[in-house]
Amino acid sequence: MPKKKTARIWNREMETMPRARLQKLQLERLKETLERAYTCVPFYRKMLDDARLKPATLKGLADLDRLGFTSKQDLRDHYPFGMLTVPLEQVVRIHASSGTTGKPTVGAYNKNDLAVWAETMARAYTAAGVTKKDIIHNAYGYGLFTGGLGFHLGAEKIGATIVPISGGLSKRQITLMEDFGATVLTCTPSYALVLAETARESGVDFRARMKVRVGIFGAEPWTEEMRQEVQERMNLEAFDVYGLTEIIGPGVSIECPEHNGLHIPEDHFLAQLVDPDTDEPLPDGSTGELILTTLTKQAMPMLRYRTRDRVMLTREKCACGRTMARMSKVQGRTDDMLVVRGVNVFPSQIEQVVLASEGVAPHYLIVLDRPKNELDILEIWTEATPELWGLGQETVQRVETRIGRDLMETLGLSAHVSVLRPNAIQRSEGKAKRVIDKRELVN
Ligand code: DLL
């Protein structure tokens, strides 16, 4: 009989730990986290007091269900540093992602937290079969976004060669990917398709000329169809990676070669599922909103964070040997946050810009599309006031350009703006449907 290949696992002791032992470890770490949160963050102290929970007397993990939730709004209310449990001088890194009010959501890390992140990213790379022999072309954005630096940190931990190319300048990316002999590509799935497209347009046969064998793609929803498309065009094995700034960044979960769910390092992040409408806990095997509690983060621990992401959760042992819980691909969001080209966009941000613009009526539509193998297209349709319309097309176009510029400033994203004739946009008597999402995301 052919010998079964053993799966590569970065931290075998932790990642294959029997569940009973894992739960014991989780409880210990949870108590420490609650203690720290209770002592240092008034918001959490109130949350624990309201639930009549004392960190020291916590009996089991199930007690956690008694606690309320932490939401994005709570983080906004305590912007920027109200959730810190350490003095700012111990914070060694700050990341952020965009939020509804123009105020970003902050993630703060002390040295311990960066070590936790490096560990979870090392596990993620290893699950995808990446080793120190690999050359990683990291096209996630470097900056406040956690993608670039998160993947960077993990690559250094496993001792691989990282090329910190960041996003953009796609032609150059293709040249360097070939010249440096990249074996791993990390970026959003939509950018992977753009790179494939750029190679083709430049007359480069990606499949034949590139050595890339693994792609680690995430930060935005993507379908199985998209996976097939990328794998086919780039001749690589694509792995889905998930994460969010509030929890740590990328590395909250990753697929293994079984591709039957994304493993969550549960010794660092405790995963629960609730019904987003009733807030009631849901059993494994069902689909609901993913709720995450950090177990080892120090500077900014999160208790029962509402991710708004809909997933299915299972704790059955995986064929790869890992005992860690698996979540399905993200099946959608429970709120209205849109992820456009990997950037978080809230319709309310767009509304603010449109409504603040002179010459346009307060009616608008957000149209999202993803033409085959291209980046998401964001279109904003709005209406001219009769006065503006009367001034002629040239003036209307100037307004379109101005709104486009304002949106770029607010969202950091380019949008195609159309100012239509008065009354062109359908009115609604009930709830207005503001978003038309034509991207094929339902699996
Ligand atoms: O997107 C972290 C990340 C970077 C993950 C690089 C993976 C790779 P945020 O900008 O805070 O963090 O956005 C988090 O993006 O709540 C999801 O809605 C969405 N998201 C992230 N990964 C996936 C994925 C980073 N694999 C929000 N599939 C999350 C679907 C994803 N949605």
Image (spheres, helix red, strand yellow):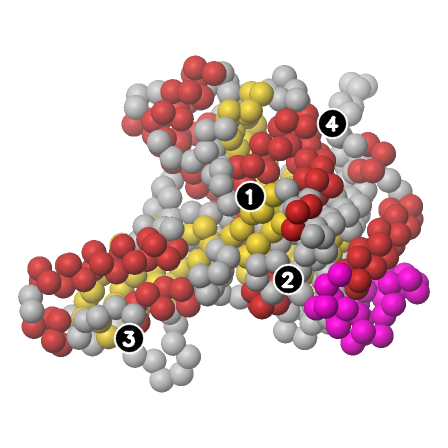
Residue 405 x/y as whole percent: 27, 54
Residue at the extreme bottom: 429
> Which amino acid, mark 1?
Thr
Three-letter residue code for mark 3: Pro
Q: Where is residue 71 in the image (x, y as percent from the top left)?
A: 62, 65
Residue 134: x %, y % from top left: 60, 20
Q: In this view, does 186 lie to the left or right of 286?
A: left
Q: Earlier in the sequence, mark 1 or mark 4?
A: 4
Considering only order in the chain, which callout, 4 or 3, is on the residue closer to the N terminus? 4
Picture coordinates of residue 21, whole percent (x, y): 91, 46
Q: For mark 2, what is the residue?
A: 82
For disc 3, the neighbor class at 10 Å (few under 14, some 14 to 19, many from 20) is some
Residue 8: numbered disc: 4
Q: For the point 69% across and 32% down, which residue is it?
A: 122
- Image quarter (top left, top right, bottom left or bottom right) of the N terminus: top right
Mark closer to the chain start, 1 or 3: 1
**Of helix, strand and loop, which one carries label 3?**
strand
The Cα atoms of the two marked residues, 2 and 3, are separated by 35 Å
Q: Which amino acid does label 2 sit on?
A: Gly
Q: What stretch is highlighted in magenta?
A: 40-67
Q: From the Cβ of disc 1, is ligand 1 less than 8 Å away?
A: yes
Q: Is mark 2 on a helix, strand or loop?
A: loop
Which residue is pictured at 58% across the width and 32% down the height? 152
Please give the residue where the numbered disc 1 appears in the rendered image.
146
Disc number lying in front (2 or 4): 2
Distance from disc 2 to disc 4, alpha carbons, whole Å, reads: 40 Å
